Amino acid sequence: MRTFAKVVNLTFKNIALMNKFTLFASLLFFSLSAFAQTDIVEWKFESKKLDDHQYEVKMIANIRTPWHIYSVTQPEGGPLPTKITFTRNPLATPEGAVKELGKAETRYEEVFELDTKFFSNKVEFVQLVSIKGNAKTNLNGKIEYMACTNEQCLPPREVPFSIALK
């Protein structure tokens, strides 16, 4: 009877140890996956004063090869377009649409049955912003984008930003 109790006790210890190892391996895998995903697109934010009441704001995406992100203009039914949302600020008003500077590529994708527009390597999203008076303020918001290769896409990501206008 004592031997049976020792075997059962050892079995439970092995199961507990195996569960701890599985948990550790899972956490390590997901941590590395999340870290790798953040390296795919690196964002940089800049502002340039054009005159007393207007700024040019740049949101620059450096995209690791072989990945790409989609344009802000995608037809309905296609992949998730890059979306830039600005937080309401009574001192700073975005003027017009966001412009895209970079080498845009267009390709027919059978999955969506339409042409998609995307950027590889680098793209600059440029927004003109008007400010009231001589205010020193920030333009806040977020960028939502989806990074893909020709074989896979990662889940959409949101990147918050705060760009000084001074």
Image: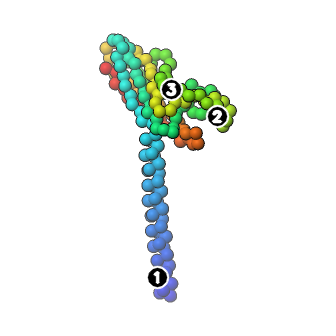
Kind of residue sitting beneath label 1: Lys
Which of labels 1 and 3 is toward the front?
Answer: 3
Label 1 SS: helix
The image quadrant where one finds the C terminus is: top left
The residue that mark 1 highlights is 6
Cα distance, mark 1 to mark 3? 68 Å
Out of 112 and 8, give the one closest to the viewer. 112
Residue marked by disc 3: 103
Q: Secondary structure at mark 3?
A: loop
Q: Nearer the viewer, residue 113 or 105?
A: 105
Residue toward you, 131 or 96:
96
Closer to the eye: label 2 or 1:
2
Do labels 1 and 3 touch, CB within 8 Å? no
Q: Amino acid at mark 2?
A: Glu
Residue 159, x across and y down, in percent: 44, 34
Q: Residue type at mark 3?
A: Lys
Relative side of 113 to 82, left or right:
right
